[in-house]
Amino acid sequence: MNAKRCLRTLVCLTVVLGLLLGTLSAQAASTVTVLQVKNDYVRLHSDVGGQGQVLGTLRTGTKLFYLGRADSMAYVCTEYGVRGYAYAGYLEAYSTVRMANVYYVKSSSLTVYSSASTSSSRVTTLPNGYILLLTDAYGYWGSILSLSGGVGYVQLSGLQRVAM
């Protein structure tokens, strides 16, 4: 059991490192910054002033795509596709990824497998609109990484490239 956990952690770290190194070698490519929440219970608001509807509460360590800034608020997008404003002082830069690697689930749901085969074990199911990183593609399959660290394989027909 520990060997599986170590292997999974190693694979995840390798993928993240590969994404980071890939962005350094392709500086001309369009990129997006990934932010990390550094305080617990950070509110995600529907408007800049923080006076509108609270769309959700973010926990320490949550990763977000950075879309822009207005005053002291950062405009961000969660891995579930929810866009809103969070106080920038509670966020810190985590990494930068190539936009060419950012995809969303276009089907009603998408099954994530442990290997590139429908006969392999199912890891999870992702909902429509879920945003993830495509780390490699071959044939009808792609390996993915979620902002929360999940890894697996999906059928490419269920994905669409994001235009942030």
Image: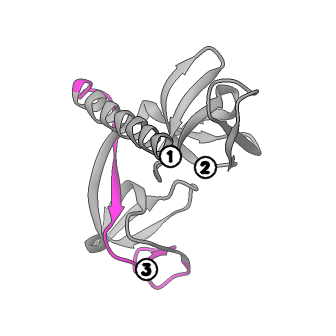
Q: Which residue is mark 3?
A: 41
Pointer 1 with pointer 2, Cβ within 8 A: yes
| Residue lying at 69% horizontally and 27% vertically, measured from the top left | 157
> Left or right: 125 with respect to 102?
right
**Label 1: few (<14), some (14–19) or many (≥20) C-alpha neighbours in 10 Å:** some
Marked residue nearer the N-terminal end (3 or 1): 3
Query: What amino acid is found at the position of numbered circle 3 in the picture?
Result: Tyr
Q: Which mark is residue 130?
A: 2
Find the distance from the CA under tag 1 to the CA under tag 2: 9 Å
Mark 3 residue element: loop
* Label 3 or label 2, whichever comes before in sequence order: 3
Q: Which residues are magenta?
A: 25-54
Is 7 on the left or on the right of 30, as rendered?
Answer: right
Whether tag 3 and tag 2 are in contact, CB under 8 A, the answer is no
Task: State the image coordinates of residue 31 (x, y, percent, origin top left).
Answer: 33, 38
Q: Return the residue at label 1.
A: 146
Q: Position of residue 55 (x, y in %)?
A: 56, 74
Q: Secondary structure at mark 2?
A: loop
Up/down of 41 relative to 156, above or below: below
Closer to the camera, 103 or 134? Answer: 134
The residue sitting at 42% across, 63% down in the picture is: 62
Question: Residue 17 placed where, x, y %?
Answer: 30, 35
